[in-house]
Image (tube, rainbow, N blue to C red):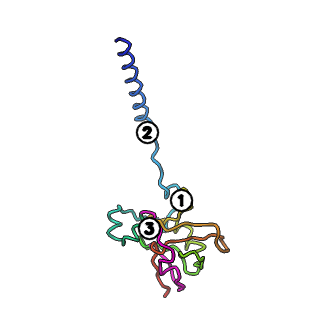
Amino acid sequence: MKANHLFLIGCLLLIGGILGWRWLHPEPARKSAFERSGVVPPQGRRVVKTDAEWEELLTAPQFYVTREKGTEGRNSSPLTHLHQAGVYECVCCHNPLFASRTKFDSRTGWPSFYVPIAPNAVYTDFDGRRTEVLCSVCDAHLGHVFTDGPEPTGLRYCMNGTALTFKPAR
């Protein structure tokens, strides 16, 4: 009986020690993809909203693509074949993302660009399979970037048209 009590006391001390260690040495908070990127968004502007707030502002397809990291259907966006001068902005926060002069026909079925409008307009994160492209102001999922694009960058920013709005040049 005494051995059982000693074993029980030993287990309680061990558990107490582990809990005490965790209390004294908490795990550091995991940084978000945005924090890991080191990108400072244009004018330092950040837009942070709850999912409920985004759902009120966006259509169901926009919410699915930008907040749930979805992908629209191939050739489903009218922006895919738009060839007009202007700027493509984030549908969530209107951050300017791509200039029309950097758009090209990638024959993939999604709007494609070879460079963002500014280096800090977007940031990237590896999503387990591909390099995801996100808006640096509101963290909206925009699409993915690939290394099979045209010169001068060799990059193809393959964007969901649902995640973009187009502002024509004046």
**What residue would you read off at disc 3?**
65
Q: Can you tell which of label 1 and label 3 is closer to the viewer? A: 3
Residue 125 has which mark?
1
Q: Is residue 134 above or below residue 109?
A: above
Q: Give percent across and percent down for residue 117.
A: 55, 74
Q: Main secondary structure of the magenta part?
A: loop
Q: Quadrant of residue 140?
A: bottom left
Extent of the magenta region: 68-90
**What residue would you read off at disc 2?**
26
Q: Secondary structure at mark 2?
A: loop
Q: Can you tell which of label 2 and label 3 is closer to the viewer? A: 3
Which residue is the extreme one toward the right?
Answer: 151
- Tell me the CA gap for discs 1 and 2: 26 Å
Q: Is residue 50 left or right of residue 80?
A: left
Alpha-carbon neighbours of circle 3 within 10 Å: few (<14), some, or many (≥20)?
A: many
Q: In the rendered structure, does residue 135 fall within the stretch colored magenta?
A: no
Residue closer to the observer: 111 or 117:
111
Q: Give percent across and percent down for residue 137.
A: 45, 66
N-term-proximal mark, 2 vs 3? 2
What residue type is disc 1 on? Asp
N-term-proximal mark, 1 vs 3? 3
